[in-house]
Image (spheres, helix red, strand yellow):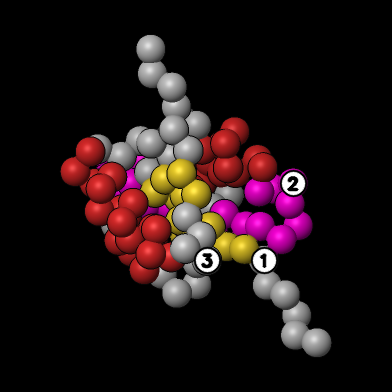
Amino acid sequence: MAEQRPLRFGILGAARIAPDALIKAAQNVPDAEVVAVAARDPKRAREFADAHGIPRVLATYDDVVNDPELQSAAELASLRVDDRGAARRKARAMRKAACFQRRRG
């Protein structure tokens, strides 16, 4: 029987909601790992990755969505509208996309 690999996530955007919404949750699930992040600001992405133990920083949202090592991309509603549309279309194509949005108000 083939060994089951964990579900590997990439995060689109270094949002403040990510630790509670995805990273901590994934740490409590043996078959899930957050392994990549991309943000508009590469420095912010690197700082976010370092702070949360994420091993890879990718240059663009497209890089996360198109990475063959990832099974899912999580958008955490921190993307600008022009970035969000393209990222959502591509993430949906993965058929395993997760999207989280904060309520504003």
Q: Most extreme residue toward the right, as rendered?
A: 1
Residue position for label 1 = 6
Which numbered circle lies on residue 19? none
**Left or right placement of residue 2 versus residue 87 in this view:** right
Q: Residue at x 24, y 37 (%)?
A: 80
Earlier sequence position, callout 2 versus callout 3: 2
Residue 98 x %, y %: 50, 49
Kind of residue at badge 3: Gln
Residue 17 sits above or below residue 51 on the image = above
Kind of residue at badge 2: Asn
Residue position for label 3 = 71
Give the Cα distance between marks 2 and 3: 18 Å
Which contiguous range is marked in magenta?
A: 26-45
- Residue 45 visible from this viewpoint: no
Earlier sequence position, callout 1 versus callout 3: 1
Placement of the N terminus among the 4 image quadrants? bottom right
Residue 81 x %, y %: 22, 38
